[in-house]
Image (cartoon, rainbow, N blue to C red):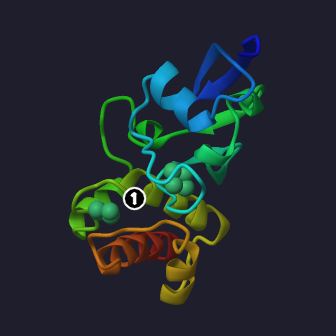
Amino acid sequence: MAEPRKISFTINGMVRDGQAEPRRLLADFIRDDLGLTGTHIGCEHGVCGACTILFNGAAVRSCLMLAVQAEGADLRTVEGLASADGQLDRLQQAFRDHHALQCGFCTPGMLMAAWDLLRVNPTPTEDEIRTGLSAVLCRCTGYQGIVEAVKAVAGQRHAAR
Ligand code: FES
Ligand code: FES
């Protein structure tokens, strides 16, 4: 096994240090070393999207990245969406309101992908939402509730403008 390397990064607004051997996956590091098990691992080869997190603000599949790539990066996982007092982010609340989850396995990845979609395009059409979330697979919901939840948040943003 190769020597572990030190890494320093920010995750969910907190500066953290860690050590990882060069081949260690970022998804495993987040779950096992940092204890942030909200990030799920489904396929472990870039297909299902369950492991999606924000890396320097953009959605990435953490099973396709190495932990050492987090050096100096700003990471956000699903645990970082709610406020410190536990109040849900409005995207989380919209998922709740629109029955956008059943087993919940895809939900962390879906939330992070939706977050990135709304960052890039704050007022997406339904087609744009479906395309934007197409990289995350859900085996339960039929996607309609998820699309409705994202539409609701996009609508709020539209109204706020
Ligand atoms: S676990 Fe990363 S894409 Fe499936
Ligand atoms: S809610 Fe079960 S996989 Fe999406």
Q: Which quadrant would residue 87 be assigned to in this image?
A: top left
Query: In which quadrant is the N terminus drawn?
Result: top right
Residue 85 point in image, percent of width and height: 32, 30
Q: Which quadrant would residue 83 be assigned to in this image?
A: top left
- The residue at label 1 has a CB less than 8 Å from ligand 2: no
Residue occupied by mark 1: 91
Q: Tally the numbered discs.
A: 1
Front residue of 68/132: it is 68
Front residue of 2/77: it is 2
For image coordinates 38% across by 58% down, the residue present is: 106
In the displayed structure image, the side of residue 27 where residue 92 appears, left or right = left
For image coordinates 22% across by 65% down, the residue present is: 97
For image coordinates 61% across by 16% down, the residue present is: 16
Residue 69 point in image, percent of width and height: 76, 33
* Residue type (three-letter) at the residue carrying disc 1: Leu
In the displayed structure image, the side of residue 88 where residue 59 appears, left or right = right
Residue 64 point in image, percent of width and height: 66, 47
Residue 117 point in image, percent of width and height: 58, 67
Query: In which quadrant is the C terminus drawn?
Result: bottom right
Q: Is residue 153 above or below residue 44?
A: below
